[in-house]
């Protein structure tokens, strides 16, 4: 394969950008099934035109999941991405699609409609150049990543478990690095109950739920261990009704991130060991570490060095990093599949109003993707 694919995709940029614009202008917030399905239909149609086998996996609440196959063989490569966004309908009116200073702005450009567009054009190039594949390709585009993949987690795990590799088209890290590890994480919800009483007349009869919770807030914050990559942050607290009533209720939401399975176990144990400090108070814990950490395994390291080799053939150096945020790559890796994440666009501003993709970086990313799809 002697072609310089970077220049090939550079020539195709106008068409790639136009396709991304089409996707972005079809807003697809996770909770709007109708809107998500509308974009799903378009994506399915595009891949169908390339000769792919399309499976729509119907969902009641969220958009239908798309499983798309190309090629033959017992072994497969899983390509993962999502086409739901966190941006509500109407965001486009306030933050319209625009090209400015070599950047493509608009809701969902970077996270991660560009990634799906990359996959489409890479596959189209593979087909038009009759490049042989060594494995079957399975594209899995899900519709509820932004809320934790509630209806697609099991499907992703099953697909990853029967795949040789998983390539995730989520955005790259800021400097273009691929993501070879991600923290795992989740949310805990801790509720304290006490006994209400008149704060003036019956202070001694009350059990102050806020006081009870305060002890645990400090304990939970102290479970953080930066050296091990573990963080806990009490993000909200609520409780009580009015100042002259001893509160019988208080609750806290806690964000947790862990880098290893060992730490996930340690934190889960510590959280479950919290017990009431005040006589008469009760504690209830809900939630947990829903996303397992994506650890940098030997398989991941090997896969990354293969990607690096392919980038060098295109004349650039790929770097890797670990990040705190999670993706569906966490589930794929937890299913035992070597997973390379962050193969999507370079840019910035996921979930923010300055969300954008850097145009100049697109051809190189797509070249590496095409090379991985044909050489793995
Ligand atoms: Zn994403």
Image (tube, grey):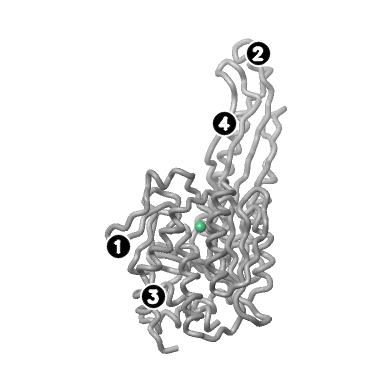
Q: Mark 3 points at which residue?
A: 9
Instruction: Report how far apart the C-alphas of labels 1 and 3 lie in the structure.
Output: 16 Å
**Residue located beneath label 4 in the image:** 238
User: Marks 1 and 3: CB-CB under 8 Å?
Assistant: no
* Picture layout, residue 276 above or below residue 6: above
Q: Which of marks 1 and 2 is nearer the N terminus?
A: 1
Describe residue 158's horizontal placement relative to residue 376 as left or right.
right
- Tell which residue pokes out farthest to the top in this image: 201
| Residue at 62% from the left image edge and 59% from the top image edge | 65
- Residue 102 numbered tag: 1
Marking on residue 202? 2
Quick check: is the Cβ at mark 4 less than 8 Å away from ligand 1?
Answer: no
Tell whether label 1 touches label 4 (CB within 8 Å): no
Badge 4 or badge 2: first in the primary sequence: 2
Q: Is residue 302 above or below residue 289?
A: below
Disc 1 on helix, strand or loop?
loop
Q: Quick one: label 3 or label 2, which is nearer the N terminus? A: 3
């Amino acid at each position: 394969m002697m072609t310089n694919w970077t220049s090939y995709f550079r020539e195709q940029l106008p068409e790639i950008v136009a396709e991304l614009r089409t996707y972005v202008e079809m807003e697809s917030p996770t909770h709007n099934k109708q809107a998500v399905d509308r974009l799903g239909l378009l994506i399915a149609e595009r891949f169908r035109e390339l000769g792919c086998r399309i499976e729509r996996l119907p969902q009641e609440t969220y958009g239908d999941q798309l499983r798309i196959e190309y090629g033959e063989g017992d072994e497969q490569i899983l390509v993962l991405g999502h086409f739901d966004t966190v941006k509500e309908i109407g965001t486009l009116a306030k933050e319209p699609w625009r090209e400015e200073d070599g950047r493509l702005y608009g809701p969902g450009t970077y996270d991660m409609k560009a990634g799906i567009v990359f996959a489409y054009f890479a596959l189209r190039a593979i087909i038009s150049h009759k490049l042989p594949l060594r494995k079957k390709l399975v594209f899995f585009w899900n519709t509820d990543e932004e809320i934790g993949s509630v209806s697609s987690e099991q499907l992703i795990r099953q697909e990853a478990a029967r795949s040789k590799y998983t390539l995730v088209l989520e955005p790259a890290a800021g400097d273009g690095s691929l993501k070879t590890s991600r923290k795992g994480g989740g949310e805990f919800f801790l509720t304290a109950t006490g006994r209400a009483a008149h704060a003036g007349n019956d202070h001694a009869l009350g059990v102050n739920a806020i006081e009870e919770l305060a002890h645990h807030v400090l304990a939970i914050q102290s479970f953080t261990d930066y050296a091990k990559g573990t963080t806990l942050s009490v993000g909200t607290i609520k409780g009580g009704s009015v100042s002259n009533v001893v509160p019988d209720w208080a609750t806290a939401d806690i964000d947790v991130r862990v880098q290893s399975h060992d730490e996930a176990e340690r934190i889960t144990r510590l959280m479950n060991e919290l017990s009431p400090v005040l006589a008469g108070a009760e504690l209830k814990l809900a939630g947990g570490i829903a996303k397992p950490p994506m650890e940098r395994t030997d398989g991941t390291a090997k896969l990354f060095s293969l990607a690096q080799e392919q980038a060098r053939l295109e004349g650039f150096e790929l770097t890797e990093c670990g990040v705190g945020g999670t993706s569906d790559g966490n589930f794929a890796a937890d299913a035992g599949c070597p997973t390379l994440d962050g193969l999507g666009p370079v840019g910035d501003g996921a979930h923010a109003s300055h969300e954008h993709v850097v145009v100049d970086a697109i051809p190189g990313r797509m070249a590496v993707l095409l090379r991985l799809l044909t050489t793995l």
